[in-house]
Amino acid sequence: MTPAATDDPQGLTRVPVALAERSYDILIGSGLVRGAGATLAERFPGRAVAIVTDAHVGEIHGPALEAGLSAAGIRHHRITVAPGEATKRFAVLEEVVDQILAHRLERGDIVLALGGGVVGDLAGFAAAIVRRGMGFVQMPTSLLAQVDSSVGGKTGINSRHGKNLIGAFYQPGLVLADTDVLDTLSTREFRAGYAEVAKYGLIDDPGFFGWLEANWRGVFQGGRDRVHAIATSCRAKAAVVARDETETGDRALLNLGHTFGHALEAATGYDGARLVHGEGVAIGMCQAFRFSAQLGLCSPVDAARMANHLKAVGLPTELSEIPGGVGDVDRLMAAIGQDKKVARGKLTFILARGIGESFIARDVDPAAVRAFLAEELARG
């Protein structure tokens, strides 16, 4: 059963993630950054906090967060890393871990991730390994992180062999999704996050996808439509995580578009100026639907419909829209071969029979993928 989103007395929307003794809440609403000190003092009394953030986010939101922590009497230390996907690597992880230990944070204390998906993945992995597991709180500041990466416990860093290949499943004790901070995002960043919102409709909720087609401008503008989109996305992910925490079953559906998308990110060298994660997912989802249509699984009408919606929002839908290109078929196939869903050398993709009818396709023929990618490269 999908967890309900409930409103608490502070006007926040609460989405529970049901994982027995490791259950936690996602709180969605206004003022959560400045009110975090009071929230943490109530839920985790007596804990010190290591704030992991990047230089950009820390400058904008760090002062309000730290003022609230100080007012609540919470000892805290800020650890600042560089923005961007290149931060998710061993050298930066070592630096973060060293600072947590140098400031004498104990096992019961909290690592708080203030930032987008990069910071959340990095800080979460640090929390998982320091002192064999510290407390962990996610405070996602991007739309993408609020609806996807902050929920479900996936943490990790990248390798030269591929994205997110080194990490751990490590659940937070709380997620604080402050909708106010999204107003500080660039249009490009917000659009990139919207790709993950649309994903939930494309996986198994055609009604939500239809609602997005009619109301996406309201999501971008803010207010009730934005909260509804975030809460619906979080409810969907929470339900999947509760059923399949470590991705041995249908949690893999959340990777719709990601096998192609991660290959595109690798092909661009994780250069955020050329392609950010959500843009890769947008193109990847379009490719998953076009590939499904080519295989006779999905109507070309549905493939065109979903691509037209993403295009209307302003997201890229074609390889030709990636500055500098992505190389040749061999380069893309090599990246796909390193995908985490590869099992005993067999390719696994999330494909679709229609809008809201995605499924896990195992042992996909590499020759079919290669031929499809050759056509995709020729489209531009």
Image: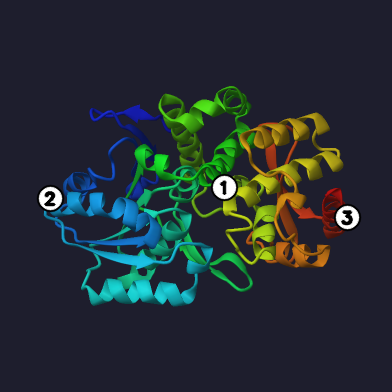
Residue at 48% x, 64% y: name it: 156
3 or 2: mark nearer the eye: 2
1 or 3: mark nearer the eye: 3
**Which residue lies under the disc numbered 1?**
251
Mark 3 / mark 2, whichever is N-terminal = 2
Q: Is residue 344 visible?
A: no
Q: Which amino acid does label 3 sit on?
A: Ala
Distance, label 1 to label 3, CA atoms, is 28 Å
Residue at 59% x, 64% y: name it: 163
Q: How crowded is mark 1: few (under 14 residues within 10 Å), some or many (20 or more)?
A: some
Residue 293 on image: x %, y %: 82, 39
Name the one closer to the observer, 80 or 323.
323
Q: Assign a secondary structure to mark 2.
A: helix
Distance, label 3 to label 2, CA atoms, is 60 Å
1 or 2: mark nearer the eye: 2
Q: What residue type is labelled 2?
A: Ala
User: What is the tally of numbered marks visible in this picture?
Assistant: 3
Q: Residue 71 carries which label?
A: 2
Residue 112 on image: x %, y %: 31, 57
Q: Assign a secondary structure to mark 3.
A: helix
Name the one closer to the observer, 121 or 310.
310
Q: What residue type is labelled 1?
A: Arg
**Which residue lies under the disc numbered 3?**
371
Residue 5 on image: x %, y %: 39, 30
